[in-house]
Image (cartoon, coloured by chain):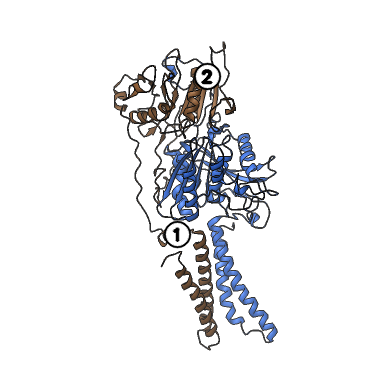
Chain colours: A blue, B brown
C-alpha cells in the first residue's frame, strides 16, 4: 500500500473522524485540572494532525511527490513498476532502470517506456523522448496521473507518432529539493544528470538513436521549464522540446546568479544566437505565469529556432489540462525527430538502380 | 462567485470563524445529542479550514482557474484533423504501377532559378497510405549523374540549383507548392548538397525548422569499394550553418539521400486533436481490451506504413 494509493488516504480520513468523535468523551475525563489540560490539548492536536494528514495525503495523490514509503521516509527516491506494465501486441512495456551517473554523481531510478515491437526489432534504433515531471512531483505522475503509457500506445498504434522510447527520470534526488533541472551551485547537478548520465545509461542499455536528431524533451509545469531550458542549452544533444504549462525561468536560486542569465530562457533568446531546434509551447490561457512566459518566449524566438504554440481556452495548471495537451505534444515531438533507424542507417550496400533505388536500403529481415 | 476571488475566500474564512464559535458555544450545552453535535462541529470547522487553505493556495498558483475547470464543465468538441489529399495524388494513381518519378512543373517554377524543372521521386506505398504525410529530402546542386535516387518512405525532390537560386526557393517556394501537390509535411525536411552548394544549403538551414539536417556529398568519385558510413559531424566545420543543424558527410548521392531521410520523421497521421488547437478536455475512446492483431512480416518498424 503505497502513500499515493487510496488506502492511506481513507485511513487518515477515518482517523480524522475518530479523533473528532473521541474529543467529546475525553473532554471532562481527567479529574485533575493539570491532567485535564493535557488531555484536552492532546485531543485537539490529534484532530488537527489527522485533518492535515488527510489533506497532505490527498495532495500527494495529486502530485505524486512521494510515490513510495522509501521516498517519504528519507531514503533515495524509488520507483515501483506500475501494475499492468506489460501487455500484448500493440502495447508497450514500462520498466525501470537505475541510472548511476558518473558525470553528476547522482544515482537515481527511472521509468522507461518501450514501444510495441521494441523487443522484436533489436537492430532498430529508436528515437527517444525524455519526459520531465513537475515540482512537487515525481516521474510516477507521468504514468499514473497522465497515463503516459496508454497515451503513447494509442498515438503509436494510430500512426500519429513513430515508435519511440520514452524515459521518465527524476529531476531531483530529494523530493523536498527543487532543482528545476539545473546544476545547483554546491548542490545536486541535475542538468548534468539529465543531459549526460541519463542519455549515456539509456544508450548503453537500450537500442536507441545516438544522434541529436533522435532525441527530444517533454515536461509539464517545472518540467516544462526544464524542457525549454535544456533544449536551448543543449542543441547538440536534443532536436526538439515540448513544454506544457512551462516557465521561462527556473524560479529558484541556482546559487551563482545564473537563474538570471544562462538559465533564463528569455535572456538566452535575447543575448545568444538561437539554435536550430524546434520548441512546442502549450499552455492554458487562464494559467497566468506560464501563459505570460509562453507568450514572451514565442515573441522572443527568432530563426533558426522554430516555435509552435498551442493555447487552451480554459483549464488551468492541473493534471486535466496536461492530459488534454499530452497526446498532441507527443505527436508534435514525433514530427520533429528523426525516424526509427534500421541497421543500415546511412549505409547503402548496393548502389541503387532505377527501381531498386526506391527500395529501402538493407532490405527485409 | 469566482473560484479564485477574494469574496469566496472571505466567505469561507468567515465560515471557519462561525463554525469554531458555534462549536465552542455548543460545547457546554447539556444537549442530549452532544456526542453528535460536538464531532460534527469539529469536522465542519476542520473541513472549512482546509477549504480556505486550498482556496488561498489555488488563488496564488491558479491550479484551477474557474468553477468550470474544477468541475469539468467546460468541454469543447475537437475539430477532426484531416490530411488533405495532394493535388497530384489522383494523377499518380493513374500512372503505371511502380512509376514514381516525374518532372514536377508547379506554377512559377521557372522563376526559381533552377537549371530544369525539379524531379520528384514519390516512395512506394505513398498511395496506399492516404492518411499519412511524408517527409521530404531536397537534393540541391547540379551535375548529379545517373537516375534520380529515391528514399524509403520519403519524397525526394531533385532541384538543380544554380547561382541564381535563393534560399527562399528552398525554404518557402518549394515547401508551399509541394504541400499543395503531394501529402508532405510542412517542416523538418532534410537537404542533400554537394560540397560546392553548401553555402546555399547553409542559408536555407538558417530558416526556422525547415531543414535541420544537411547531407554533404564529398567531391569526386567515391573510393573504390567504399563502405564508409555517413559521418555526422559537429557543425563547426561548415561555416554559416547554425548550431543544432546536423551535417553528415557522404561519399555518394544514394548514401546521402538515405541518411538525410533518416533525419526526418516517418510518414505520420495528423495529430488528433491538432497540435495548435487543443480543446480543454478531449476524451479519447479507450483502446479495446483485446490485443491488436499481430502485425505481419516486413522489415518495418511496427506502426509505420509498408509499401
Circle on res. B65: 1
Along the horizontal axis of the image, is A189 left or right of A151?
A: right
* Sequence-first disc among 1 and 2: 1
* Quadrant of the frame with the N terminus of chain A: bottom right
In front of the other: B165 or B51: B165
* Residue positioned 48% across, 18% down in the render: B254
Q: Secondary structure at mark 2?
A: helix
Point out the residue furthest to the top here.
Answer: B224
Residue A249 visible in the shown view:
yes
Along the horizontal axis of the image, is B206 left or right of A254?
A: left
**Residue A174: x percent and y percent?**
65, 53
Circle on res. B195: 2
**Residue B130: x percent and y percent?**
35, 32
**Residue A165: x percent and y percent?**
54, 38
**Residue A330: x percent and y percent?**
47, 42
Disc 1: CA contacts within 10 A as few (<14), some (14-19) or many (>=20): many
In front of the other: B85 or B201: B201
| Mark 1 chain | B
Residue A364 visible in the shown view:
no
Amino acid at each position: 500500500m503505497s502513500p499515493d494509493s487510496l488506502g492511506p488516504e481513507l485511513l487518515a480520513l477515518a482517523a480524522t473522524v475518530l479523533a473528532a468523535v473521541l474529543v467529546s468523551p475525553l473532554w471532562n475525563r481527567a479529574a485533575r485540572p493539570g491532567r485535564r489540560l493535557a488531555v484536552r490539548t492532546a485531543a485537539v492536536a490529534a484532530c488537527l494532525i489527522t485533518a492535515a494528514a488527510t489533506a497532505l495525503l490527498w495532495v500527494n495523490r495529486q502530485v505524486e511527490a512521494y510515490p513510495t514509503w522509501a521516498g517519504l521516509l528519507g531514503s533515495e527516491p524509488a520507483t515501483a513498476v506500475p501494475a499492468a506494465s506489460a501487455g500484448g501486441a500493440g502495447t508497450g512495456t514500462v520498466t525501470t532502470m537505475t541510472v548511476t551517473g558518473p558525470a553528476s554523481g547522482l544515482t537515481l531510478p527511472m521509468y522507461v517506456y518501450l514501444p510495441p515491437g521494441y523487443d522484436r526489432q533489436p537492430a532498430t534504433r529508436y528515437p527517444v523522448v525524455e519526459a520531465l515531471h513537475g515540482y512537487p512531483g515525481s516521474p510516477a505522475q507521468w504514468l499514473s496521473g497522465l497515463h503516459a503509457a496508454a497515451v503513447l500506445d494509442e498515438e503509436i498504434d494510430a500512426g500519429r507518432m513513430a515508435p519511440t522510447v520514452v524515459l521518465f527520470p527524476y529531476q531531483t534526488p530529494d523530493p523536498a529539493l527543487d532543482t528545476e533541472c539545473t546544476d545547483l551551485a554546491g548542490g545536486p547537478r541535475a542538468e548534468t544528470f539529465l543531459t549526460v548520465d541519463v542519455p549515456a545509461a539509456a544508450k548503453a542499455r537500450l537500442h536507441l538513436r545516438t544522434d541529436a536528431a533522435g532525441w527530444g524533451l517533454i515536461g509539464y509545469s517545472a518540467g516544462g521549464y526544464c524542457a525549454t531550458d535544456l533544449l536551448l542549452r543543449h542543441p547538440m544533444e536534443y532536436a526538439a522540446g515540448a513544454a506544457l504549462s512551462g516557465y521561462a525561468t527556473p524560479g529558484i536560486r541556482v546559487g551563482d546568479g545564473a537563474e538570471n542569465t544562462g538559465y533564463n530562457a528569455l535572456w538566452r533568446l535575447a543575448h545568444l544566437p538561437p539554435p536550430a531546434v524546434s520548441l512546442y509551447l502549450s499552455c492554458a490561457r487562464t494559467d497566468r505565469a506560464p501563459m505570460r512566459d509562453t507568450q514572451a518566449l514565442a515573441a522572443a524566438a527568432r530563426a533558426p529556432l522554430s516555435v509552435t504554440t498551442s493555447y487552451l481556452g480554459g483549464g488551468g495548471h492541473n493534471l486535466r489540462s496536461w492530459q488534454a495537451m499530452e497526446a498532441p505534444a507527443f505527436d508534435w515531438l514525433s514530427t520533429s525527430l528523426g525516424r526509427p533507424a534500421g541497421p543500415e542507417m546511412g549505409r547503402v550496400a548496393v548502389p541503387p538502380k532505377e527501381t531498386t533505388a526506391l527500395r529501402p536500403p538493407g532490405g527485409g529481415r | 462567485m469566482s473560484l479564485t476571488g477574494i469574496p469566496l475566500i472571505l466567505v469561507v474564512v468567515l465560515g471557519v470563524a462561525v463554525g469554531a464559535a458555534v462549536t465552542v458555544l455548543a460545547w457546554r450545552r447539556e444537549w442530549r445529542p452532544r456526542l453528535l453535535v460536538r464531532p460534527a462541529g469539529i469536522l465542519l470547522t476542520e473541513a472549512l479550514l482546509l477549504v480556505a487553505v486550498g482556496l488561498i493556495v489555488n488563488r496564488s498558483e491558479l491550479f484551477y482557474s474557474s468553477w468550470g475547470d474544477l468541475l469539468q464543465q467546460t468541454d469543447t468538441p475537437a475539430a477532426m484533423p484531416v490530411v488533405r489529399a495532394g493535388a497530384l495524388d489522383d494523377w499518380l494513381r493513374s500512372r503505371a504501377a511502380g512509376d514514381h518519378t516525374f518532372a514536377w512543373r508547379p506554377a512559377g517554377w521557372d522563376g526559381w532559378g533552377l537549371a530544369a524543372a525539379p524531379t520528384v521521386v514519390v516512395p512506394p506505398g505513398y498511395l496506399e497510405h492516404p492518411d499519412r504525410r511524408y517527409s521530404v529530402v531536397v537534393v540541391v546542386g547540379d551535375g548529379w549523374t545517373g537516375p534520380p535516387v529515391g528514399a524509403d518512405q520519403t519524397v525526394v525532390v531533385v532541384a538543380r540549383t544554380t547561382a541564381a537560386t535563393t534560399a527562399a526557393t528552398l525554404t518557402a517556394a518549394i515547401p508551399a507548392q509541394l504541400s499543395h501537390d503531394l501529402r508532405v509535411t510542412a517542416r523538418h525536411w532534410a537537404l542533400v548538397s554537394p560540397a560546392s552548394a553548401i553555402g546555399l544549403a547553409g542559408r536555407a538551414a538558417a530558416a526556422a525548422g525547415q531543414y535541420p539536417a544537411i547531407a554533404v556529398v564529398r567531391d569526386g568519385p567515391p573510393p573504390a569499394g567504399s563502405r564508409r558510413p555517413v559521418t555526422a559531424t559537429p557543425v563547426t566545420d561548415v561555416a554559416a550553418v547554425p548550431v543544432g543543424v546536423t551535417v553528415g558527410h557522404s561519399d555518394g548521392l544514394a548514401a546521402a539521400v538515405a541518411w538525410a531521410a533518416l533525419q526526418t520523421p516517418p510518414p505520420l497521421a495528423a495529430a488528433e486533436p491538432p497540435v495548435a488547437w487543443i480543446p480543454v478536455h478531449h476524451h479519447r475512446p479507450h483502446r479495446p481490451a483485446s490485443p491488436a492483431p499481430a502485425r505481419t512480416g516486413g522489415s518495418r518498424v511496427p506502426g509505420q506504413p509498408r509499401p
